Structures are given as C-alpha cells and as structure tokens.
Image (tube, rainbow, N blue to C red):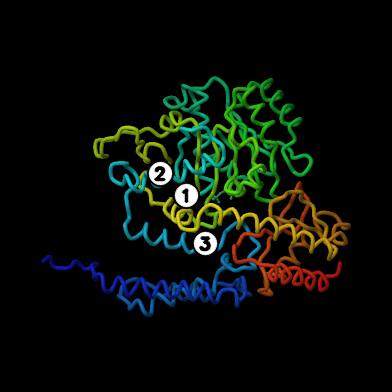
Amino acid sequence: MNEAGPLDVGEEEGARLLTAAVDLVVRHAKEVAEGPVAPAEPGTAWLREWLASQDFEAARSPEDALPEVMAALRRWGVHTTHPRYFGLFNPTPTWWGVAGELLAAGVNPQLAAYSHAPAAVEMERHVLRFMAGRLGLPAGAEGSFTVGGAEANLTAVIVALTRRFPAYPRSGLAGLPRRPVLYASAESHLAWLKIAHMTGLGRDAVRLVPAGAAHRMDTERLREMREADLAAGLEPFLLVGTAGTTAGGALDPLPELAALAAEWGAHFHVDAAWAGAVALSDRLRPLLTGVELADSVTVDAHKWLSAPMGAGMFLTPHAAALAESFRATTSYMPAETEDAPDPYATSVQWSRRFAGLKVFLALAVAGRPAHAAQLERDVRLGERLARRLTEEGWLRINDTPLPVVCVTAPEAETAGPERSAAWHAAVAEHVVRSGQAWLSTVRLGGRPALRLCVTSHRTGVADLEAVVSALGDARKRMGT
Ligand SMILES: *Cc1c(COP(=O)(O)O)cnc(C)c1O
C-alpha cells in the first residue's frame, strides 16, 4: 500500500464532498426562482472583505467552505438560471449538461491527442457530425469544440486565411501582397474586432456593413464597400453572415451572401452562435436556409441548447484546411492515429477539457425531439411576450421570428436618442433592482431600446406576465 499523499483524501471524503456540492446545486435550482434575479445593490465591499480573509494558508473544513462559496455566488451575481432572466442567451443548464460536466471533470480525459482519449474524441466528433448534418453541411465535415462562439469565430478567421492565402501559414500577413479585409454586418457580434486585433489583421480590417430592413445586412452596401476596397488595393477574403444577431435576432440573407462569397472567391462563414440551435427543429430549421452552403459555421451549445458554459462548436466542410491551420508535431506528443485527427492539431487549444460530453449526454438522454420542442416552445413564448408588450403600448423595433424582443416607449423617444437611451436605461435598472426580472438595454441601428430574450427552459407564461407588469410599473414611475 502506498502512503497517501497530502492531497489524497480518499474516495469516502470525495463522495461526501460531491454529495454536499450536489445538495447545494439542487437547493439553488429549487430556491433561485423565489429570490431576486439580480442583487439589489451592486456593491461588492462585503465580497472583497470575505476574500481578504481567504489567504489559503490554513486548511478548512468543506462544510464551512462550500456553503460560503455558494452563498457568495448566490448573493453577488445575476442569476442566469432564474426563469425571469430575459438576458444574454446564458441558459439555465439542463441537468444532463450539469451531470456531463461532473463526469468530464471526474474522469478528466486529455483531449489533445486522439490516442489518449479515443472515446471522448469520438463522442465529440459524433456530436459535431450530428450538428453538421442537421445544418445540412456535406458529409465529411469536421470541427472542434471551443470555449465559446468567440473562439469558434477566431478559428474561422484562421481557417479562412489559410484556405485563401497559401503564403499565410509560413509568412503570415507580411507575406501577402495586399491587406486582407473581412465583411460582417454592423449588427454582428463585435468579437470580430478582437479577433482582427489578435490575428494581426488589425481592427480596421473589419468592414462593418450597415444593416438594412429588419436589421439584416444590406447587400447593396456590401457590394459598394467591396468595390471601394478593391479599388483601394485591399483583399476581401472573408464574408460573415450572422444568423441570429446578438442584439435583435436578425437573420442575414444567407443564400445571397453564399452566392456573393462564391462569386468573389471569399470564405463564407455563418455565425449562428445563438440561433444555430434551431437546426435541431424540423419546423424552425428553414430559418437557417443557406447555412448548408457555408465554408464554416459557429454554433454555441451553451446558448440556446442549454448546455453549461464552455461549449462552442466550430464546423467546416474543409477538413483539410482545418488540419492545415493548426498542424503541429512535437517529440513528446503521441503519434497520430490514422483517420483520426488529433484535437490539438485541429483546434486553437492544446490540452482541452471534454466539453462535448455535456452536449452528448443531453442529446443521448433527452433526445433531439425534446430539444426541438423546447426551442419551439421558446419561440411561442417570444411571440407571446412581443404581443403582450405591444398590447401594453410598447413599440417593438426588431423583426425576427426568434424569441428576442426589443421595445421602446414611444413617449420617451421624442426627446432624441440620448435622452431616450437614459430613459430606457433607467427603466431597465428599475426592473433589475426590483429583483423581478433581468433584461438589458440595447441599441438597434443606433436606436436605444429595451431587450428581452427568452433563454431559460424554466421560463413560462407567468414569468412573461411578471416582466410585463414590472416594466409597466417602471414606466409609470418614470413618466417622461
Ligand atoms: C454570443 C455570441 C458570440 C460569442 O460567443 P461566446 O460563446 O460568448 O464566446 C458570437 N456571435 C454571436 C452571434 C453571439 O450571439
């Protein structure tokens, strides 16, 4: 028998700890809906004081430490698992997803090399191929799990540069005769700016195309901008269509963008981080028409598929370009397995957690049809929320079948955009401080508004009525 190491407290202690953690999580799920969605005062003095006492020098009993941590999380945070969190796509995770996280952490497979974790890698590939199939991508599509949509979009830029410019892998941007630029809608997710910064393209390389009707990319303007860029000696290499913009759920005209990208020889990426989930529903899938023509696609399982955070997906029919983009060989990594790419050589990451298990488990246990039914239910709730707000005199300013509703109070808009922004921000703050609901402010095409998104599978009709009523109270208090 080995002598136990200082961190080896044994399985019995482990079981006690995990049981206590499970109890806390289950209790949180039970109680969260009864409390405020967000803390009334955002001050964090108490939090800092508590942390100052944590110098990590003395061991503590988990019976003290665990509830303390949980109390801090519950007291000082916006509760994305609350049924009246009408927020930024952070879902209430499903139990299958939470269980998947626990299993992945406990077994802790190393997903860098295939030969180290064939079961884990193949389960992830199975989910990625399932998703690619639902999206209509050609057979042979590959991909990778990412931390989130931002990393998936970064992957898209690297793959696009690699596909488009043979000199790029070795010489980088310095090896290109002209400066590459990419196009995305002004309503797209602005991680594109960070990505351009990180990849050396530079932020100016992101050409934000104004949105037209329904906040979709204006393709006339896109053509004009490309002409001007070509005339200025720039090199358009990537066209991004957003399927479900973050602010207002706008769906860019994907078939038209696919045709333009093909005509121009540009890589066509579809950022469907949020709305890509609808591929699981036969009824909603047509919203994504054109995505099957994409050279790459981003879908976040940790948004509308209700996986816990850290489950982005990058998908591409160009498996060879993906492998070329991240190829690496080392003396210390295990040798490659035939027909099984090593994840570290097809991904931004190296050592990587088994992010796909939570998605695999949710699909394997609940099944695709239950996920589809949930998405369809959320869409119906979104329609109902839009109708109720309109009945109460709010003006809906976004136009999408997706369950995100952006509204303004017409009486507050007459004083100009700056006054309107302050007014709508004050209304949102009033509702959030009341603890009744969480919603955000947004600007759509520059126009200040309130934004409500149905994003929790625990949200129901009573929650919609509660937020409508809380907004009515705030509006009354504010006057104009
Ligand atoms: C959320 C979102 C992203 C970023 O994804 P993360 O998972 O937060 O990294 C990118 N694009 C769109 C359209 C999004 O909604």
Disc 2 + disc 1, Cβ < 8 Å: yes
468 or 220: nearer the viewer? 468
Residue 256 placed where, x, y %?
69, 31
Q: Is residue 291 above or below residue 191?
A: above
Residue 440 placed where, x, y %?
68, 60
Q: Is residue 154 above or below residue 274?
A: above
**SS for tag 1?**
loop
The residue indicated by pointer 1 is: 147
Q: Is residue 42 above or below residue 235?
A: below
The residue indicated by pointer 3 is: 93
Disc 3 + disc 2, Cβ < 8 Å: no
179 or 439: nearer the viewer? 439
The residue indicated by pointer 2 is: 349
Reading the chain from its start, which is encountered first: label 2 or label 1?
1
Residue 240 placed where, x, y %?
62, 36
Disc 1 residue type (three-letter): Val
Give the alpha-carbon distance from disc 2 to disc 1, as whole Å: 9 Å
